[in-house]
Image (cartoon, rainbow, N blue to C red):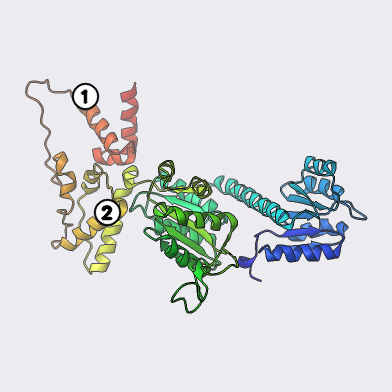
Amino acid sequence: MSDSSLYPQFPVLLVDDEVSFLRSMSLTLERNDINNIHTCSEPRLVPELMQQLNAGLVLLDLTMPGLSGRDLLTWFKEEYPDVCVIVISGINQVEAAVDCVKQGAFDYFVKTTEQSQIIEGIKRAIRTQELSIENQLLRRQMLTTELQKPELFDSIITASNTMWSVFKYLESIAKTNQPILICGESGVGKELFANVAHSLSARKGELVTVNVAGLDDDIFADTLFGHSRGAFTGADKERPGLVEKAAGGTLFLDEIGDLSLASQVKLLRLLQEGEYYPLGSDKPKRIQARVIVATHQDLALRQEQGKFRKDLFFRLKTHQVKIPPLRERLSDLPILIDHFVKLACNELGKSYPKVPKRLPILLSSYTFPGNARELKALVYDAVSRSHDGTLDTSSFTHLFDKENLSLSQGDSVTFHPNMPVPTLTQMAEQLVTEAMSRAQGNQSLAARMLGVSQPALSKRLKNMKN
């Protein structure tokens, strides 16, 4: 059995001296898609088994010969405090249950308890342990200063420290099983981030992408979950859905903020229970894919408006990646322009044109509602218009005409005739203030606007504060 088909990812160890109970409990767990199971009928072998397995969840009997469950529970809390231990005992006593919980047991069940209650308790423990493992991994990776796999981010062109922080966070959560919510305005590259997250996860399956905007409930269910033969008129054969196609890989649901409320219920069940029903089938299937969703919508606002389920929103925001818009990382403008010009030249078969140095500076006053996608379209249009070895900038002029700006080097400054002429110091301070405002506090970009070095600008800013 491959690792991708095992659930949970960590081993579950069953410890009981009754071999018949181990067999029946194993079958019950497997029927509920919990198949990463190991059994032990000799309690004295538990320490050796734990060294081999590194189990994350232990189901422990209380009364066993040689070494009791209480002794083992104490040993687990001392040697493996991060392991969840559930006691499943034949003793139906409140005192015993309370005592075990005080010793650190996650839960306590009597063997005669309804199996559905025991399974639900085990699933709760699995979810708790998954989050604990992910948090530990997150802490370890966030403490490092370097990316583990920087080459996987090559498709995202940036020099922004904010984006670097997003990279670090994405890398730290990429291998967890919890869903990832990617938020950002249209054009910021959410699908690029989904691709990077899939690559970082090292999952052997493929990345399956579906845009869920506008899908009605039936089409959403059929697209994701598939259907059985005879599920509806025309369903002459069984058809697997995209969830099954993404098994061992990643399922990427784009525009999740536009999903209907009825479909949100189905998605919540998929994420919460880890299972789904193909249309026309009464037999559930377990999802074996990691889910990534993306939206340009403000989900918190849509939840307040009653357009997005609160429980689904909280389920999705466990790992939330927020991509900053281009106007908040203006230092990326020069390298993005250069990157898109090269791409356009390669596609159009043109030689690289000379790009006016002031172009990124003048564009920094534009808000770019379409973000990098809009900039790419503008650059491609400019390259297609260029013929004399210099980038044709007519595609950009409408963006800064409102500010009476131009790409010429002879811009002049006028003063009101009835006002005194400002001193050189006052004028310099106004220029610095304006540059810092346009650069939104980015000293490197402001320094380029002013034609000075970043240290020189930093020194002048300090002098202005004194």
- Residue closest to the far front: 233
Residue 327 x %, y %: 31, 44
Residue 428's place in the image compared with 334, above or below, is: above
- Residue nearer the viewer, 368 or 281: 281
Mark sitting earlier along the chain (1/2)? 2
Quarter of the rendering occupied by the C terminus: top left
Badge 1 amino acid: Gln
Q: Residues within 10 Å of mark 2 (few under 14, many from 20)?
A: some
- Label 1, label 2: how many angstroms apart (C-alpha)? 37 Å
Q: Residues within 10 Å of mark 1 (few under 14, many from 20)?
A: few
Residue to which mark 2 is pinned:
374
- Residue nearer the viewer, 368 or 35: 35
Q: Is any atom of residue 28 visible in this view? A: yes
Residue 71 x %, y %: 87, 48
Query: In the image, 111: left or right of 296?
Result: right
Query: In the image, 336: left or right of 88?
Result: left
Residue 313 x %, y %: 49, 47
Camera-near label (1 vs 2) is 2
Residue to which mark 1 is pinned:
426
Q: Quadrant of residue 463?
A: top left
